[in-house]
Image (spheres, rainbow, N blue to C red):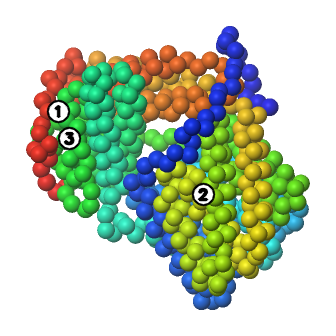
Amino acid sequence: MSSTPPSPHPDPRPVRARRLPLVGVLRPGRPSDIWFKPASSVVVATALPNLTLLALGRLDLVMYTMAGTFCALYAHNFPYAARARVLAGVVAGMTASIAVALVTASLTSSAVVLVAVGALLAAAQKTLCDATRVGPPGHLIFTFISSASLFAPQSLGQVPGHLALTLAGGAVAWLVGMAPALVRPHGPERRATARALNAAAAYADACTGAARDAAAPGAERARAAAAGAVHAAWQSLLATGVRSAQARRALARLVVRAEEALAVPETADPDALRAWAAGLRGTGAVPRPRGAHPGEEEELLGVDAELAGPKVPLWRRLAPGSPLLPVALRTAVGCALAGYASLALGIGRPYWALVTAASLYQANVTLTWNRGVQRVVGNLIGVLAFAAIAPFAHLGHAELIVCCLVLAFGAEALITRNYWLGSVCVTPMALLVTEFARFQQPGELILDRVVDTLVGAVLGVAAAVLVTNRRATDHMENAITAAERAREAAEAVLAGAGPVEPARRRLAAALVELRAAADAAAGEWWQRALPEQRVLAAERAGHRTLAATVRRPHGHGGENVQVPRPRAGAADAWEGARA
């Protein structure tokens, strides 16, 4: 089965399947620097409705309020002006998903139909979350809640009330997600800027450690990471809104320094970059580097002008030929296969197999395989954790609520270190959620969950292998072309006398997109030979031009000449000027 027609220009070399790794798949990494934010937010947002329903004696309605309160997991990397819109969109998307599930459940009891609707919903949720770049936890929460709702007894008359509970929970999640703005209104932008400064410092260190060779493999990886972090910082600043112009400019001065270190790492001072990043913690003054950056005001005005620029419409990301569509097809096929296989085995909760399959799909087969291994390991350990927790949770509904809240916090605390660690907490929490209506036999729940996990993982990975994504290489070639055109446009600006900032940011975005496309294609199966040398050449040429746009004196044409500034001492790196 293939999601795209054969290429009109097949590569003469044979197409081969790539090896699926095992080493390192379960190795824990460093936690996210903001892991505690989604963890604490979901606990607070979920506790309020749960305790209210406990007082009313209606814990059977918890699933509907949790559909809304789990929206508190989203948008923690967005500036608050953008977060308000994103969270509202997440709540609307969750409500729409629940509405489809509840109406379907009220109209039919056919498990075959319910699985089909669940698979299509999962594919739509995966595609829209990727297209809108809503960020973690992506489509998984949508699929988990809507799939469970499909198999909950329902009547049409109950649907409006249950949707109202979802909206009420979503309103609580929105308020909890926006509450930190009262204390630290520019926290997300400060964190994004700090990440860019630290990544630029790591690149400068890598160049020094590799005998000052910016083409060494370690330095290449550090440069790609720094370019992505700088691009993300600019995107964060561009999303702050017009009311944050003063704070945005103060942070933009630091992003310019990170960009400069990325362009000329041999003259960068990593200690100074890290000192500025450390100065962005808390709510104190935004560090202000000593010494004026050439054309700094033009740079900041360029950011203001870019705010008024056109935005890429959503439909363009979903147009025919989009790399998102093969992944959507994989999701639909894999979820349907898993759900129907679970039905054939006589499992009473086929949506667990469906959700397992939906949770696997990443940018390519290799990453999907990794997620499959992590999911199986995490779920198997998680059911053992459930067996240990169940006796306490069954003491009463208050204990059940406490267990769910603790597990929700633990899941968010661990999942950024490795997905399987988070699954150890997510699995018992998902099992306990089914018991809000009535307590059940732990042995039956454990058996069903283990079987559905194995079925969903095996068939989910099989669907990823069978539904080939031949567009991955095409997308990479298109990304190469886009990067080359962005580089040519930037060079044309350098040869003229126009503002260089928009061209530079377009080139930076194209290089980030090229790296993402190359990484996605590198882990895909059944691909023709990848143009790896073209990617390497396009990246190096693009970064050379990107460096020239930073070194160029702003507002002037002619040669791209600028005398590198000597390294400043870390102690003199910044002065505490309040933005």
| Comes first in the chain, label 2 or label 1 | 1
Q: Quadrant of the C terminus?
A: bottom left
In the picture of the structure, the residue carrying the numbered disc 2 is: 423
User: Which residue does the image show at 36% across and 20% down from the upper left?
Assistant: 215
- Residue kind at label 1, given as amino acid type: Pro
Question: Which is closer to the viewer, label 3 or label 2?
Answer: 2
User: In this picture, is 142 found above or below 152?
Assistant: above
Picture coordinates of residue 519, whole percent (x, y): 53, 31
- Is the Cβ of the residue at disc 2 closer than 8 Å to that at disc 1? no
Distance between mark 1 and mark 3 Cα atoms: 22 Å
Relative to 8, 370 lies left or right: left
Label 1 packing within 10 angstroms: few (<14), some (14-19), many (20+): some
Say what secondary structure mark 3 lies in: helix
Residue 227: which numbered mark, if any? none
| Comes first in the chain, label 1 or label 3 | 3
User: Which residue does the image show at 69% across and 21% down from the upper left?
Assistant: 16
Q: Is residue 238 among the parts visible in the rendering?
A: no
Picture coordinates of residue 539, whole percent (x, y): 42, 23
**Quarter occupied by residue 549:** top left
In the picture of the structure, the residue carrying the numbered disc 1 is: 294
Say what secondary structure mark 2 lies in: helix
Relative to 429, 194 lies left or right: left
In the picture of the structure, the residue carrying the numbered disc 3 is: 271
| Comes first in the chain, label 3 or label 2 | 3
Say what secondary structure mark 1 lies in: loop
